[in-house]
Amino acid sequence: MKKVSEIIWGLIGLAAVAVSCYLLWGELKTLSWSSIEAAFAAIPLHHFLLAGLSTLVAYAALAWYDRIALLHLGVRHISWLFVSLCSFTTYALSHNIGASVFSGALVRYRAYTSKGLSAAQVAVLVALCSFTFGLGTLLLGGFVLVYDPGLLARLNNLLPAALTNPATARLVGAALLGFVALYVIGSVLRFRPLTIRNFKVEYPRPGIMARQLIAAPLELLGAAGIIYFALPDSLNPGFIPVLGIFLASFSVALASHAPGGLGVFELVFFTAMQLQTDAEKAPVLAAVLIFRLFYLLLPFAVAIVVVLLFERSRLSQALTKGADPAPPEPPLVAPGLDNHVIEKRLEKKAV
C-alpha cells in the first residue's frame, strides 16, 4: 500500500511539474537569451558573493538541525564535520530529487548507523529535523503575515479571495504564531505529548526548543537571501516581501511533490512578483536561476561525490572485515640455523 501511495504522489509531482512548466512558459516565452544574459551581467560581483554567503548560512543551519536532533537523543560522540557532511548530502539530494522519491531517511540511516545509532534513533532524528523545518516555516510565515498582511494579495490568481484579504491573512498569521507559542509553552511546562491523529509531538527540553527556534528561521532567511541579493534594486520590494514570497513559493513547491519544485516554485514566485514587462521578467528569472544554482544544483553535484566516496569507504571496510587471511605457514628453514643442524636435532628427538 505504501508503494502505491508513493507512486501516486510521484505522478502528482510530475503532473505538477508539467502544468507549472507549461504555465511558466506562457509567462517567459517572449524573453530572449540576450535579455537573460544581460540580466546576469548586470548583477554586481559583491551581490554574487553575498548570495554565496547566504547559501553557506542556509546549509550551516541545516547541519544544525541534525546536531539539535542528536542532542535531543543524547548523542554527542559524532563530530561536527560528519554531521555537516551528512546533513548537506541529505538536503542537497532531497531538495533536487524530491522528498517523496528520495527521503533523507535513507542517507541518514546509512550514515548514522555507521556511527552506532539504531534505526529507531535515526527515525526520531529524521522526524525532529522535519519538524524543526516546519516550525521555522510557521514562525516566519506567521511573522510575515502579521507584519505585512497585504502580501497574500499578490497571489490573487492562485488563492481564494478569502485568503488574500488582509484581515484574514493577519488572522492566519496570528494562528501560526499561536501554534509556535503553544509549542514553546509545552516545552517549558513539560506538557504531555500532543497527539493529532497518528502524529505525536513530543515536547523537547527547553534548550533544544530554543535551538530549533533559532536554527529553522536562520536556514530560511539564508535561502531567501540568495534571491534577495540577486534581484536588482529597481525590482527588489525589500527583504520582508521577498521572504514572504519565497516562503509561499517554497511551501507550495514542497506540497506539490514536484522533484526540486521544478516549475512550481518559479510560477508562484513570478506570480507574486507581479511582473508586467519582459524588462522586469528577465532580471527576476536570473535571480531565480541563481537560487537554483547556488541552493540546489551545485550542492547536488557535490553531494553525489560525497555519497560515492562514503559508499566506497563502506565497501572497502566490508571487504577488509570479510577477508580471513590464512595463518602464515611455518618457515622451512628456521632463521639463523642451517638445514643440517635442524636435521640432526630432529634425529635426536626421534631416538
Image (cartoon, rainbow, N blue to C red):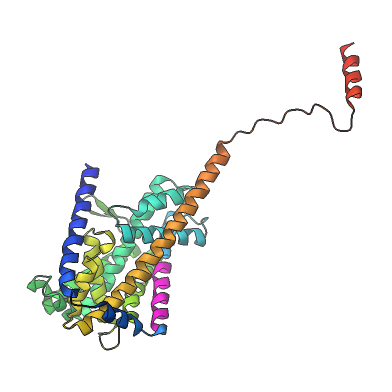
In the image, residue 12 sits, relative to residue 55, either above or below, namely above
Give the total of numbered labels.
Answer: 0
| Quadrant holding the C terminus | top right
Looking at the image, the residue that sits furthest to the bottom is 234
Q: Is residue 172 above or below residue 5?
A: below
Horizontal and vertical percent for residue 111?
45, 51
User: Which percent across, then down, holds residue 32?
Assistant: 24, 78
Q: Is residue 50 magenta?
A: yes
Q: Is residue 258 magenta?
A: no
Residue found at x 22% / y 80% = 281
**Which one is in front, 83 or 266?**
266
Q: Residue 63, located in which quarter of the rendered image?
A: bottom left
Q: Residue furthest left?
A: 161
Residue at position x 37%, y 72% in the image: 218
Q: What residue lies at 22% left-to-right and 74% top-to-bottom? A: 269
Q: Is residue 95 left or right of residue 175?
A: right
- Whether residue 268 sits left or right of residue 189 in the image: it is left
Along the line of sight, which residue is nearer the eye, 309 or 215?
Answer: 309
Main SS of residues in magenta: helix
**Residue 283 in which image quadrant:** bottom left
Does residue 228 appear left or right of residue 28 in this picture? right
The segment highlighted magenta reads: 47-61
Q: Residue at x 15, y 68 (%)?
A: 23
Front one among 222 and 320: 320
- The residue lying toward the viewer, choosing from 26 and 210, is 26
Q: Is residue 73 above or below residue 33?
A: above
Residue 68 visible here:
no
Q: Position of residue 288 (x, y in %)?
A: 29, 74
Tell me the quadrant of the picture where the N terminus can be found: top left
